[in-house]
Amino acid sequence: MGAAETVSRSRYPANDERKLDAMTKTITLEVSHPDGKVGLIEGFNFLWAYYVDGFNPHTHCQGCFKGKLVDEFKTGVASTGTVVLNQIGRHKYVYVCGVGVGPVDQLKMKNFHLPLRYEENASVTKTTYNGYIVTARNAGELTIPALPAGWNGRDLETTRCKNFQFAVEYFGYPSSRTAAPASPPE
């Protein structure tokens, strides 16, 4: 027997469990409309899902996320039906985001935000401003706490951005304070 044949699976259980987890965890995203609309989802300038692993605090919107865009659910492709998010086992979160159409002052009511984590046998359903029903199975919705205007010296566009707010909550924000020098022991 060669060396490769003698290595048992149990010798590296943690590594095998991570690989198995990455292969078996999925979130299913289902999109429908009560009027029976099928095809591309309408009413959004941008609509996407993103596997999120980290945060770039120097920007906001989709650009603040570190991770991977879901090719099967992005602007120009996102449609009614079902998408299996089969890479959630390799990523911390998935964030579904839609930027509505219309005047800027109305977007707050039209934008769609659905940050998710894998949660076996759980589901969450949320409706877009224009009636699309989005259901995520094997998922739990994460809350997005608001940031106050001017938070940490950031402009209003940044502190009102839900993507940025989410990233600050779940990945933290680098401290702008410098630590005081340690006192010498007495």
Image (spheres, rainbow, N blue to C red):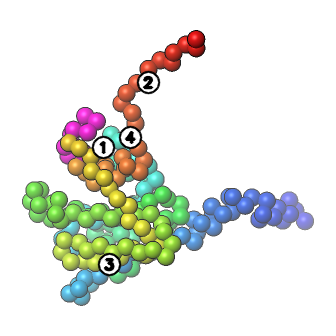
Q: Which mark is residue 59?
A: 1
Q: Residues within 10 Å of mark 2 (few under 14, many from 20)?
A: few
Residue 85 position by quadrant: bottom left
Residue 126 position by quadrant: bottom left
Q: First in sequence, mark 2 or 4: give its number.
A: 4
Q: Residue furthest bottom?
A: 36
* Whole-percent x, y for residue 63 in the image: 33, 50
* Whole-percent x, y for residue 138 in the image: 47, 73
Q: First in sequence, mark 3 or 4: give its number.
A: 3
**CA gap, disc 2 and disc 1:** 24 Å
Q: Which residue is mark 3?
A: 31
**Of helix, strand and loop, which one carries label 1?**
loop
Q: Name the amino acid type tagged 2.
A: Ala
Above-or-below relation of 158 to 136: above
Q: Which residue is mark 2?
A: 179
Q: Which residue is mark 4?
A: 173
Q: Residues within 10 Å of mark 3 (few under 14, many from 20)?
A: many
**CA gap, disc 1 and disc 4:** 12 Å
Magenta segment, prevailing SS (helix, strand or loop): helix
Closer to the eye: label 2 or 3: 2
Q: Name the amino acid type tagged 1.
A: Thr
Q: Is residue 66 visible?
A: no
Viewport quadrant of the C terminus: top right
Q: Residue furthest front?
A: 186
